[in-house]
Image (cartoon, coloured by chain):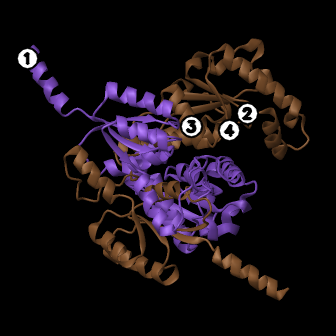
Chain colours: A brown, B purple
Amino acid sequence: MGHQQGSDAVTASSSAPLPVCFISDSTAITAETLGNALLVHFPDAGFLRRTFSFVDTVDTAREVVRQISERMPQAVVFMTVRNVDAAAVLTAGLSNVVDLLSEHLNQLERILGMPRTQGDHAHPHGMGDTDRYHARMRAVEFAVEHDDGQSLRMLELADLIILAPSRCGKTPTALYLALQHGLRVANYPLTEDDYPGQQLPGPVRPYSERCFGLTSSAHRLSQVRQQRRPGSPYASLEQCRRELLQAETLYGLHQIPFLNSQNKSVEEIAAVILQRMGLRKSPVRIH
Amino acid sequence: MGHQQGSDAVTASSSAPLPVCFISDSTAITAETLGNALLVHFPDAGFLRRTFSFVDTVDTAREVVRQISERMPQAVVFMTVRNVDAAAVLTAGLSNVVDLLSEHLNQLERILGMPRTQGDHAHPHGMGDTDRYHARMRAVEFAVEHDDGQSLRMLELADLIILAPSRCGKTPTALYLALQHGLRVANYPLTEDDYPGQQLPGPVRPYSERCFGLTSSAHRLSQVRQQRRPGSPYASLEQCRRELLQAETLYGLHQIPFLNSQNKSVEEIAAVILQRMGLRKSPVRIH
């Protein structure tokens, strides 16, 4: 028995997750986003991730080299560090460095016919243009205030109103679009009583051209609702079927574009909405 | 006069913003994130952005090539398209293509000693591991429910509790950490009446080791509050000064790490909190 455990351990160890480090001079959002988008191409390898943010001086770079060399010298390192000296310390001190910026910047210099700036003041995920930044934060407030039809105050300012029966993904989608794209997004629930005569619910009726609907499959919706209120009529398959059919009928009647959110992530739902509604503003979180 | 307008137009045209296209086979999050992180290095150029998401077949790639060639043939193109044939159509048909994946994937194949997968099922911003995805969505619900001390239900499950006086950035930070990192984040307001005797407010007192504080400058806080309630005592410089002093004293007494959020974006605040609180889980939105 002890022997078996031992051989299991060897197997486990030989397939131990490979350390991956993200090293950034700022938030590490770029390094993590691209690094992870690359790693999904190697689904058979297991990875153990570690992030080092705000590595923007030679001293912090040296400290990071020391830590990685001691604890995980074979780590794959994704790097977005603009300070040339700090980047040189990392490249010289670590083995498997994937520099996510340099080559692309060289190519852009050729395409644009101008040199990159040498200052390191421009952080892609800093405040940037403060007016835009604050507009984005106001969009987040708007989305929180207008979650699930809670408030109708200044609904006329909404860039988008997401409609759906309960538990189809309205809330995270609205918050995501507000946070990442600075859009003022309200979300409004469709309940059985709320739209007699196949009219849109009163408060959103004047804004039908800004509405987008979500739907799901009855089976999936019932599962999700069972987690919330087990055994309730609200969670029954029959009720879910009826609500989804009503919602889809309503979308059809009022020419409201809609999407089945069942197997889609909030990022995918948001991307579809941006595309279908022509809502993609120039990104608000950068210059 | 007409002449002057004409010469203005020439100037405007010679410094017209350069079209930039992001072409992705999925949400375009990776392409936009890295593309924009690269473009900030060219602050003197103006860019006009356009995103093409879900370009995952030869046919959609051909349509995109047609549109770009007609309307903006000189566009800089950032591409994250994994389908080899679709990518080839784009590279052959467009001028200034920056391929954000290929070279890095080649390098990773060498480092990892294994080939990339040829399937294109693994989307970095799809649902991925559905258990993890749903845990992330529950974290978003938790953050909405526990916004601004509105609910104390299951507060014991919070990974993090953000404390701050009104208008220091609690809400967007909490939502960001929930959405992007799957953390259950509550946020709780510090008001003058709420912490007599320099105790932490009752509901969060048992969880002081999970608390993180935000502060600001009195001047900035007063500005922000003036926008909300002009001329109110709440917005007065004196009141803001007093509240911030009380908050910082409280953080100090209870060893609660804190950050001045005044000139920081929500992404930067979140990155600092993750680092200081040791909260960075393996990213939850990817495999």
Callout 2 touching callout 4 (CB < 8 Å): yes
Q: Residue at x 88, y 29 (%)?
A: A238
Q: Nearer the viewer, residue A274 or B204?
A: A274
Q: Quadrant of residue B287?
A: bottom right
Q: Could you tell me how far apart the alpha carbons at marks 2 and 4 are, in whole angstroms?
A: 9 Å
Q: Earlier in the sequence, mark 2 or mark 4?
A: 4
The residue at which mark 1 appears reads as: B3
Element at badge 1? Answer: helix
Image position, residue A159 (x, y; %): 51, 28
Which percent across, then down, holds residue B101? 44, 52
- The residue beneath circle 4 is A169
Residue that carries the numbered disc 3 in the rendered image? A270
Q: Is residue A248 above or below residue B172?
A: above
Taking the image as shown, residue B237 lies to the left or right of residue B270, namely left
Instruction: Classify mark 3: residues with Cα within 10 Å, few (<14), some (14-19) or many (20+).
Output: many
The quarter of the rendered structure image containing the N terminus of chain A is bottom right
Q: Amino acid at mark 3?
A: Ala
Chain hosting mark 2 = A
Q: Is residue A268 visible?
A: yes
SS for dot 4 = loop
How far apart marks 3 and 2 lie (CA) works out to: 15 Å
Question: Where residue A216 is drawn, which disc sits there?
Answer: 2
Q: Dot 4, how many residues are within 10 Å of its Cα: few (below 14), some (14-19), or many (20+)?
A: many
Q: Nearer the viewer, mark 2 or mark 4?
A: 2
